Amino acid sequence: MSDVTNAETQAATLGEDTAPGETMIELQELTKRYPGQETPAVDRLTLEIPKGEIVVFVGPSGCGKTTSLKMINRIIEPTSGHIIMDGEDVTTIDPNQLRRRIGYVIQQIGLFPHIRVGDNVATVPNLLGWDKDRTRARVDELLDVVGLPPDQYRERFPKELSGGQRQRVGVARALAADPPVLLMDEPFGAIDPITRTRLQNEFLRLQEELQKTICFVTHDIDEAVKMGDRIAILQEGSRVAQFATPEEILTNPANEFVEDFVGTGATLKRLKLTRVREVEPTEALTGIVDEDRDVLRRRFEDSEWTAMLLLDEQRRPIRWLRGTDLRSSRPVTEVGVRARAIVEPQATLSDALEEMLLGAAGVAIVVDKRGAYQGLLDVDDIITAIQTMKDAQAEFYRAAKLVDPEAEGAV
């Protein structure tokens, strides 16, 4: 290692991209040494985390990312260094008081199995001495926010929930006292891929409304690109290899370590940066379930479409119908193919592409947060987005007079 200090090295990797915005959390040479170990688990970590953003800590196993996260709320006490939160040095205050100001979500969820869902969510408000009416109102509000109707789920025990539902309760509990800061340690890591994608998208939608300051740990660079406003790529000892926006990391990695960690296929990874809401959807041929059958058939026959998307009374997609289905005597809800590949505006184009490949129609149906139909995306939309990103990258490299690695066949 050179004689440049780690703090200086980290500062050099931050770049211009981190300057704007008010700082919520500042880590000043945060260090953790364990007895009997020659090298520190975390070595003088220096980082400024902007207010209202999701900052993702990502890196190889053993790099100290979870240790760094746990030092922020002092589940692990730092050996040295300082934690400045909203202008206050919290390194020496009562850690129990500090933790009540910080929401914490972990991979294992950590719900209390012997108490009901509502009481789990109410844990911190009860510790803070909230009255019963205020606590119950907050519990019901948050269960509704995370998609668990309180009348159905408040009185259940954790064992009666699926893994995805338990994780939602964990998020609701972390938000119960309306903390300004959330710490999330691989929160979606132990969930099946389909549920994981849905929870990621729902959480991003929630963050648009709440604007919390979030430190998020993952080992998955794809998840980091999707979830993070900024990404801190950490090397051994939580040394910062690069701290920048996902776009900057994908197009301009700071060094060889970052290049190797991000891997090839940066263009496809950037599909995780573009949201469905950024692409103008195509209008499908639609019909409402309670419309007259002859009206639906005439509309289909007068169009150039090969299928009609059937919607329910709330305009939620139900089924794809072809001409033979509309000429059948069976109810329209029993013919055709079930509408699949449904995405919300906060989903990424990568999510939409995956849904297209899994669905039978070759398109993704865009719906709003209530599930009402908004339009369609097809493969051509994805190809256009990829080409736009490739053109933008080529322009960046031309402006910077650099060699475009993807032009060299690195995709």
Image (cartoon, rainbow, N blue to C red):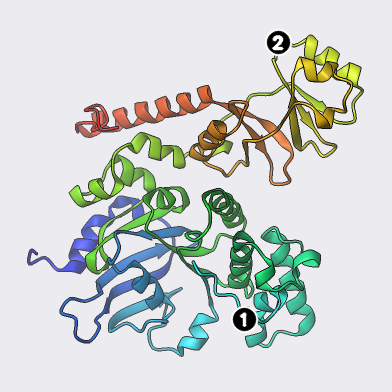
Q: Mark 1, residues whose alpha carbon is within 10 Å: few (<14), some, or many (≥20)?
A: many
Residue 83 appears in view: yes
Residue at the spot 24% in from the left edge and 28% down from the top edge: 409
| Secondary structure category for the residue under label 2 | loop
Count up the numbered dots. 2
* Residue 361 image point, x, y percent: 62, 26
In front here: 182 or 38? 38
308 to 170, vertically: above or below: above
Relative image position of residue 117 (x, y in whole percent):
69, 73
- Kindly identify which residue carries mark 2: 304
The quarter in which the C terminus is drawn is top left
Q: CB of mark 1 within 8 Å of CB of mark 2? A: no
Image vertical order of residue 56 relative to residue 103, above or below: above
Percent x, y of residue 179: 57, 73
Q: Secondary structure at mark 1?
A: helix
Q: Is residue 27 left or right of residue 114?
A: left
State the CA–CA distance, disc 1 to disc 2: 58 Å
Q: Quadrant of the N terminus?
A: bottom left
